[in-house]
Image (cartoon, rainbow, N blue to C red):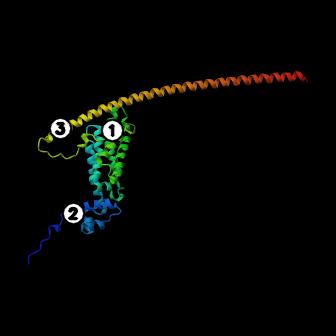
Amino acid sequence: MGTVTEPRSRRRMSGAERREQLISIGRTLFAEKGFDGTSIEEIAATAQVSKPVVYEHFGGKEGVYAVVVDREMQKLLGMITEALSASHALIKLERAAMALLRYIEESSEGFRILVRDSHAASGTGSFASLISEIASQVEDVLADEFAGRGYDPKLAPMYAQMLVGMVALTGQWWLDVRKPGREEVAAHLVNLAWNGLTGLNPHPSITVTSRSQGQPPKPRVAGGDRTGSDRIGGDRAGGEKELREFEKAREKEFKEAEKQRQRELKEAEKARVRELKERERLLKEAEKAREREEKIRQREARLAERAARLEQVDHPE
């Protein structure tokens, strides 16, 4: 009777394979139930191993959780860091927004884990600490932009927190609704962050340069389609042209904004002059009123004195 070989599906996993399996299972369970709702027994049962196997690899549930959170944080941070390597500030902002939304779309379980409060026993950082780390990178970008535009670079940390917080909270909202699409959400995010409420574009869109970032090259079509290098060159030229047009539009906006600011300053100065004149007029009127009151008081005093003298004449002692 020959020996029976173990099926390939039942072969013994290596230590590295088992570790990755436990991490994957833990990631799914933590995303669904959170840290407190997941037990070491459940992780072991799903992996079809005993609890000591999990303890051997990670020391407990906290160890699994720490690895899962650290991997997700590093993945998201790497995507944001890559996005911020773009040369133009607008492209940095667009790509950072697109990177976060792409991470949410492709790693929904990971993002659900990150946005939960990390358990203190896990020794991992929270989502807030991740956002703070991203904000510190954005801070450097904003400081350079502020310095180039004559703004106070010391304000960059505050603006970085505002900007990153806005994007992160939008991402948490989009995690469940998923409408509108990723690119449209990013376009509206950038629209608000870049243009502000007073200059919102009613129909924003992502620039060609950011839209093509991270997209796989389209297959070549027979019959005269451009080569890959031609397409890349064309996209780059189109992106550069779009940026030049954007810079012209932005310069025009700056000039209009400066004109508006000068008009407002002139109006404010005129209002201040009018206020000073009005105040001066009121002071003069008040002074005249005081003078009239003083004259009346003096006249009343003289009349009282005269009446007293007359009374002495009429009734001598």
Q: Nearer the viewer, mark 3 or mark 2?
A: 3
Of callouts 2 and 1, which one flags the residue occurring earlier in the amino acid sequence? 2
The amino acid type, in three-letter code, at marker 1 is Leu
Of callouts 3 and 1, which one flags the residue occurring earlier in the amino acid sequence? 1
Q: Nearer the viewer, mark 3 or mark 1?
A: 3
Rendered position, 201 above or below 44: above
Gap between marks 3 and 2 measured at Cα: 46 Å
Q: Residues within 10 Å of mark 1 (few under 14, many from 20)?
A: many
The reply to whether the C-beta atoms of the residues labelled 3 and 1 are less than 8 Å apart is no
Judge from the rendering whether residue 163 lies leftward or rightward of residue 218; answer left or right: right
Residue 18 badge: 2
Classify the position of the C terminus by image quarter. Answer: top right
Report the residue at 18% width, 40% height from top.
232
Classify the position of the N terminus by image quarter. Answer: bottom left
Residue 233 badge: 3
Residue placed under numbered mark 1 in the picture: 142
Using the image as rendered, state which of residue 127 and residue 241 is in the foreground.
241
Rendered position, 57 above or below 98: below
The spot of residue 220 in percent (x, y) is 14, 45
Using the image as rendered, state which of residue 99 and residue 248 is in the foreground.
248
The reply to whether the C-beta atoms of the residues labelled 2 and 1 are less than 8 Å apart is no
Residue 54 visible, this orientation? yes
Report the residue at 22% width, 36% height from top.
238
The amino acid type, in three-letter code, at marker 2 is Arg
The reply to whether the C-beta atoms of the residues labelled 3 and 2 are less than 8 Å apart is no
The amino acid type, in three-letter code, at marker 3 is Gly
Secondary structure under tag 2 reads helix
The spot of residue 219 in percent (x, y) is 15, 46
